[in-house]
Image (cartoon, helix red, strand yellow):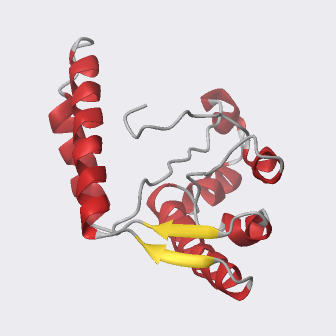
Amino acid sequence: KALGVTAVKLPAPKVYEALSTGVADGIFMPMETQKSFRLKEVVPHVTIMPGGLYYGSFAFLMNSDFLAGLSEKDRNAIMDVSGEKLAKLAGEHWDAADVAGLAAAKEAGTTISTASAETHKRYLEIMASVEQDWITNVGKAGVDGKAALEELRSIARSY
């Protein structure tokens, strides 16, 4: 709402159809989807926002009783490829996939633009109000949202 658009929530595999049939006019998705979901076929224009629009977060969850029931060898094998190691590896692969997606879009003749300084500034202003709303809402639950957000950003900058 803050961006002045009407959101249509769809699972990623349905985005191609939504764009090709006019159900959706635009999307916020990683660049890699230009190739992996063939969106280059239905997206004539891509705008790159300096600094990106968002970063995804994923978690692999396992029942602690199940993990405890594994042999020490298997448990160690899982833990050796988890946590920061997995996050770094996944991030590197996602970055490479975004590069490949951008190349695929260019090859398909997609118009690639970078948001103007004015557009970028306006986006940051809108996001500041969204962040403030979030800080206020989590504050009602006893969470120091401002501190949590700064810690998250500090951790992200370290990578």
Residue 140 image-quadrant placement? top left
x then y, percent, for residue 103: 64, 85
Asked whether, in this view, residue 13 is left or right of residue 76, the answer is: right
Q: Nearer the viewer, residue 93 or 119?
A: 119
Check the image and report above or below for 11 versus 93.
Answer: above
The furthest residue to the top? 140
Q: Could you tell me which residue is drawn at 69 percent across and 44 percent down?
A: 24
| Quarter containing the N terminus | top left
x then y, percent, for residue 27: 60, 51
Q: How many marks?
A: 0
| Quarter containing the C terminus | bottom left
Residue 139 image-quadrant placement? top left
Asked whether, in this view, residue 32 is left or right of residue 54, the answer is: right
Q: Nearer the viewer, residue 28 or 150?
A: 28
Q: Nearer the viewer, residue 128 or 3?
A: 3
Q: Could you tell me which residue is drawn at 69 percent across and 69 percent down?
A: 34
Residue 18 image-quadrant placement? top right
Check the image and report above or below for 105 versus 87.
Answer: below
Asked whether, in this view, residue 77 is left or right of residue 51, the answer is: right
Check the image and report above or below for 156 versus 65.
Answer: below
Q: Could you tell me which residue is drawn at 73 percent across and 71 percent down?
A: 40
x then y, percent, for residue 45: 60, 69
Q: Could you tell me which residue is drawn at 70 percent across and 82 percent down?
A: 104
x then y, percent, for residue 3: 40, 40
Asked whether, in this view, residue 113 is left or right of residue 126, the answer is: right
Q: Nearer the viewer, residue 14 or 136?
A: 14
